Image: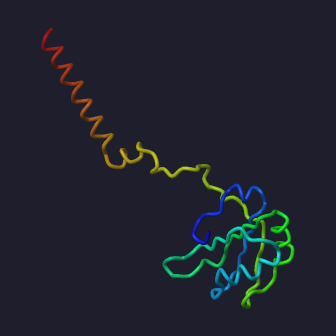
Amino acid sequence: MSDAMVGEGAIQSRRTVYVGGIADGATEATIRAAFVPFGPIKSIDIPRDYAKGTHRGFCFIEFDEPEDASEAIYNADGAEILGRALSVNLAQAHKHKLGSIKAVWTSDDWFREQSGETKEKEVGEEEERMKEDATILKDK
Protein backbone atom coordinates (compact mmCIF):
# COMPACT_ATOMS: atom_id res chain seq x y z
CA MET A 1 0.00 0.00 0.00
CA SER A 2 2.80 2.39 -0.87
CA ASP A 3 0.71 5.27 -2.27
CA ALA A 4 -2.63 4.58 -0.58
CA MET A 5 -3.69 6.13 2.70
CA VAL A 6 -3.46 4.03 5.83
CA GLY A 7 -6.94 3.12 7.07
CA GLU A 8 -8.19 5.06 10.09
CA GLY A 9 -9.41 1.80 11.65
CA ALA A 10 -5.84 0.53 11.70
CA ILE A 11 -4.69 3.70 13.44
CA GLN A 12 -7.39 3.42 16.08
CA SER A 13 -6.54 -0.24 16.67
CA ARG A 14 -2.93 0.75 17.50
CA ARG A 15 -1.41 -1.40 14.74
CA THR A 16 0.11 1.48 12.73
CA VAL A 17 3.32 3.30 13.56
CA TYR A 18 4.73 6.53 12.22
CA VAL A 19 8.41 6.37 11.25
CA GLY A 20 10.13 9.73 10.75
CA GLY A 21 13.69 10.65 9.81
CA ILE A 22 13.98 8.26 6.90
CA ALA A 23 17.13 8.81 4.83
CA ASP A 24 16.78 9.84 1.19
CA GLY A 25 18.29 6.58 -0.04
CA ALA A 26 15.90 4.36 1.90
CA THR A 27 13.45 2.26 -0.09
CA GLU A 28 10.38 0.28 0.89
CA ALA A 29 12.54 -2.86 0.92
CA THR A 30 15.01 -1.20 3.32
CA ILE A 31 12.22 -0.16 5.67
CA ARG A 32 10.54 -3.57 5.46
CA ALA A 33 13.84 -5.32 6.28
CA ALA A 34 14.36 -3.07 9.30
CA PHE A 35 10.88 -3.59 10.76
CA VAL A 36 9.94 -7.16 9.84
CA PRO A 37 11.82 -8.57 12.89
CA PHE A 38 9.11 -7.03 15.10
CA GLY A 39 6.29 -8.94 13.41
CA PRO A 40 4.43 -9.47 10.14
CA ILE A 41 3.89 -6.22 8.24
CA LYS A 42 0.49 -5.73 6.66
CA SER A 43 1.37 -2.58 4.68
CA ILE A 44 3.86 0.25 4.31
CA ASP A 45 2.73 3.69 3.16
CA ILE A 46 5.52 6.03 2.06
CA PRO A 47 4.13 9.46 1.05
CA ARG A 48 5.91 10.85 -2.00
CA ASP A 49 6.99 14.33 -3.00
CA TYR A 50 6.11 14.15 -6.67
CA ALA A 51 7.76 17.50 -7.46
CA LYS A 52 11.14 16.16 -6.29
CA GLY A 53 10.53 12.53 -7.21
CA THR A 54 11.46 11.25 -3.75
CA HIS A 55 9.72 10.22 -0.56
CA ARG A 56 8.93 12.86 2.07
CA GLY A 57 11.15 11.42 4.83
CA PHE A 58 8.51 9.52 6.77
CA CYS A 59 6.23 6.52 6.42
CA PHE A 60 3.46 4.57 8.11
CA ILE A 61 3.84 0.88 8.82
CA GLU A 62 0.80 -1.22 9.64
CA PHE A 63 1.48 -4.45 11.53
CA ASP A 64 -0.87 -7.42 11.81
CA GLU A 65 -0.95 -7.17 15.60
CA PRO A 66 -0.88 -4.16 17.99
CA GLU A 67 1.79 -5.91 20.08
CA ASP A 68 4.13 -5.93 17.07
CA ALA A 69 3.65 -2.17 16.65
CA SER A 70 4.48 -1.68 20.35
CA GLU A 71 7.66 -3.74 19.95
CA ALA A 72 8.69 -1.66 16.93
CA ILE A 73 8.16 1.56 18.88
CA TYR A 74 10.09 0.28 21.88
CA ASN A 75 13.03 -1.12 19.90
CA ALA A 76 13.35 1.07 16.80
CA ASP A 77 12.76 4.57 18.21
CA GLY A 78 16.15 6.28 18.00
CA ALA A 79 17.71 3.50 15.89
CA GLU A 80 19.77 4.43 12.83
CA ILE A 81 19.12 3.41 9.25
CA LEU A 82 21.48 4.66 6.53
CA GLY A 83 23.04 7.12 8.97
CA ARG A 84 19.79 8.79 10.09
CA ALA A 85 18.15 8.37 13.49
CA LEU A 86 14.53 7.23 13.28
CA SER A 87 11.62 8.58 15.25
CA VAL A 88 9.07 5.80 15.74
CA ASN A 89 5.71 6.55 17.38
CA LEU A 90 2.16 5.32 17.34
CA ALA A 91 0.42 6.88 14.32
CA GLN A 92 -2.33 9.37 15.06
CA ALA A 93 -5.34 10.25 12.96
CA HIS A 94 -5.01 13.45 10.93
CA LYS A 95 -6.56 16.36 12.81
CA HIS A 96 -8.24 19.13 10.83
CA LYS A 97 -7.58 22.69 11.87
CA LEU A 98 -9.77 25.77 12.16
CA GLY A 99 -12.70 23.73 13.45
CA SER A 100 -13.86 22.59 10.04
CA ILE A 101 -13.59 19.28 8.31
CA LYS A 102 -14.83 20.59 4.94
CA ALA A 103 -13.24 23.05 2.56
CA VAL A 104 -15.32 26.17 1.82
CA TRP A 105 -15.43 25.36 -1.88
CA THR A 106 -17.18 22.04 -1.28
CA SER A 107 -20.40 24.00 -0.94
CA ASP A 108 -22.34 24.94 -4.08
CA ASP A 109 -23.29 28.21 -2.39
CA TRP A 110 -19.65 29.27 -2.26
CA PHE A 111 -19.24 28.68 -6.01
CA ARG A 112 -22.41 30.61 -6.79
CA GLU A 113 -21.29 33.50 -4.62
CA GLN A 114 -17.81 33.59 -6.18
CA SER A 115 -19.11 33.39 -9.74
CA GLY A 116 -21.61 36.18 -9.15
CA GLU A 117 -24.48 33.83 -10.00
CA THR A 118 -26.36 34.65 -6.78
CA LYS A 119 -26.09 38.41 -7.38
CA GLU A 120 -27.34 38.04 -10.95
CA LYS A 121 -30.22 35.89 -9.72
CA GLU A 122 -31.10 38.44 -7.01
CA VAL A 123 -31.03 41.29 -9.54
CA GLY A 124 -33.24 39.28 -11.92
CA GLU A 125 -35.72 38.50 -9.13
CA GLU A 126 -35.80 42.16 -8.08
CA GLU A 127 -36.50 43.25 -11.68
CA GLU A 128 -39.35 40.71 -11.87
CA ARG A 129 -40.86 42.06 -8.64
CA MET A 130 -40.59 45.61 -9.94
CA LYS A 131 -42.36 44.62 -13.18
CA GLU A 132 -45.12 42.90 -11.19
CA ASP A 133 -45.47 45.97 -8.95
CA ALA A 134 -45.63 48.27 -12.01
CA THR A 135 -48.30 46.06 -13.57
CA ILE A 136 -50.37 46.09 -10.38
CA LEU A 137 -50.07 49.88 -10.06
CA LYS A 138 -50.93 50.36 -13.74
CA ASP A 139 -54.09 48.26 -13.40
CA LYS A 140 -55.33 50.32 -10.44
Q: Return the residue nearer the eye: 133 or 64.
A: 64
Say which quarter of the image contains residue 119: top left
Q: Looking at this view, name the residue that lies furthest to the bottom.
A: 83
Coloring applied to the structure:
rainbow
Question: Residue 129 at what x, y percent from top left?
Answer: 24, 24
Question: Residue 43 at what x, y percent from top left?
Answer: 68, 69
Q: Looking at this view, name the residue that lies furthest to the front.
A: 40
In the image, residue 124 above or below residue 51:
above
Residue sitting at x 75%, y 87%? 81
In the image, residue 104 above or below residue 15:
above
Q: Return the residue nearer the eye: 112 or 119.
A: 112
Say which quarter of the image contains residue 121: top left
Say which quadrant the C terminus sits in. top left
Q: Disc count in the image?
A: 0
Say which quadrant the N terminus sits in. bottom right
Residue sitting at x 82%, y 74%? 38
Question: Residue 70 at what x, y percent from top left?
Answer: 84, 68
Q: Return the residue nearer the eye: 105 or 52.
A: 52
In the image, residue 10 above or below residue 135:
below
Drawn side of residue 101 relative to residue 14, left or right: left
Question: Residue 14 at what x, y percent from top left?
Answer: 78, 60
Q: Return the residue nearer the eye: 32 or 6.
A: 32
Drawn side of residue 32 relative to residue 1, left or right: right
Q: Looking at this view, name the residue that lies furthest to the top.
A: 140
Q: Looking at this view, name the residue that lies furthest to the left.
A: 138
Residue sitting at x 80%, y 63%? 65
